[in-house]
Amino acid sequence: MTPIDDARWETVLRREADESFLIGVRTTSVYCRSGCPARTPSRRNVYVFADAAAAEQAGFRACKRCAPDDVAPDADRVRLIERACALLDAAESPSIDAVAREIGLSRFHFQRTFRRVAGVTPGEYLRARRAQRFRDGLASGASVTAAVHDAGYGSSSRPYAGDALGMTPRRYRAGGRGEQVTYAIAPCSLGRVLVATTERGVCAIELGDDDAAVLAALERHVPNAERRRDDEALRAALDAVVALADRPSAPFALPLDVRGTAFQRRVWNALRAVRPGEPVTYATLARAVGSPNAAQAVGAACAANRLAIAIPCHRVVREDGDLAGYRWGIERKRALLEREHA
């Protein structure tokens, strides 16, 4: 075993990530990455190893916090934030400061690391989880008062202030019953297009082969809302979407009624910033939202998009350039990308 040298010891003291070596601590028989957030050991007890196999051959076991035996270089941060999420979920009224202390980070580093891994801040995560518990409570048939209490809101006004549902709690519990959704259908270069609006803005843009297909998609989206077709009232919105299908790189200024989690909204906002004709990969988009390890979650957010073309999830492709999936069909995705490229 080789004692640690001055340069590497400085790296450990600064908690900098250096994948060229691992450290083993004699007193604990644990080996770690150089950037491990665990308490810094005494230098006289620290040895250097080239890799995990060498450390384990010398009788050391892998640290559970920084996971030096994991092939992913960010495994330590990912596991820390997974533990933080579990703590935030378990506590009835979790304190962000307390969770940061529990996982051995300062509040500042906890906030920064959490956002880098999860794509949202701890506060946004808590609000999203609280809103999800609220939705689950209402969906299970609980009263609005009980759902508010069980979700952890401090008062009955908080769900309204945070826009947790996109509609009133009683309407949500009834599957959107009582909400007014006006829609229109027209032909476009991609088949048939449906545009639906609420008082907040455009809530759905569906593409399909026929009217039945696009209407069925809307019904799945708002199963119990009061749906009313009015092509004339939505003529301007319909024309704008039809024009967007022909020229997907054109500006789209209609207000949108976007409903999703904090992470989904972050992904959708990033999608609207992607330049037309310059497709991005899921990994690139994950980095753009500050969560480089969340490519799979980014894909799920794209799949949850209900606003075809307006939120351009068609601009996301696989690493090898393949088009992957698309809610409204691969051929439509290919056509949109070709039009943007032209």
Image (spheres, rainbow, N blue to C red):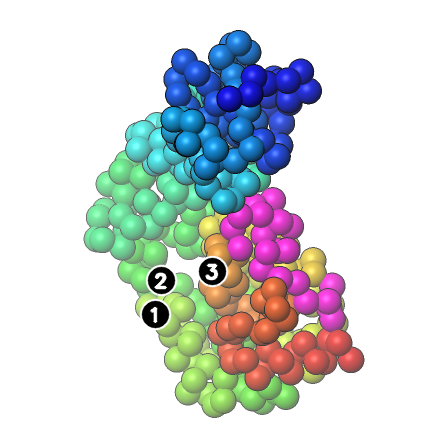
Q: CA distance from mark 2 to mark 3?
A: 23 Å
Q: What residue is disc 3 on?
A: 300
Q: Residue at x 40, y 68 (%)?
A: 221
Q: Is residue 138 above or below residue 220?
A: above
Q: What residue is disc 1 on?
A: 223
Residue 201: % across, % down: 56, 63
Q: Are marks 2 and 3 in contact (CB under 8 Å)?
A: no
Q: Amino acid at mark 1?
A: Pro
Q: Depth-wise, is mark 2 or mark 3 nearer the camera? A: 3
Callout 2 crowding tier (Cα within 10 Å): few <14, some 14–19, many ≥20:
many
Of the image marks 1 and 3, the number of the one nearer the N terminus: 1
Closer to the camera, 108 or 210?
108
**SS for dot 2:** loop
**SS for dot 1:** loop
**SS for dot 3:** helix
Q: What residue is disc 2 on?
A: 176
Name the side, left or right, on which 175 lies relative to 295: left
Closer to the camera, 208 or 330?
330
Residue 9: % across, % down: 62, 18
Name the side, left or right, on which 169 lies relative to 186: left
Q: Is residue 5 above or below residue 336?
A: above
Q: Amino acid at mark 3?
A: Ala
Residue 99: % across, % down: 42, 25
Which residues fall within the magenta stretch? 275-295
Q: Residue at x 64, y 50 (%)?
A: 288
Of the image marks 2 and 3, the number of the one nearer the N terminus: 2
Quadrant of the rendered image containing residue 248: bottom right
Residue 106 can be seen, yes or no:
no
Q: Are marks 1 and 2 in contact (CB under 8 Å)?
A: yes
Closer to the camera, 255 or 47?
47
Total labels: the figure holds: 3
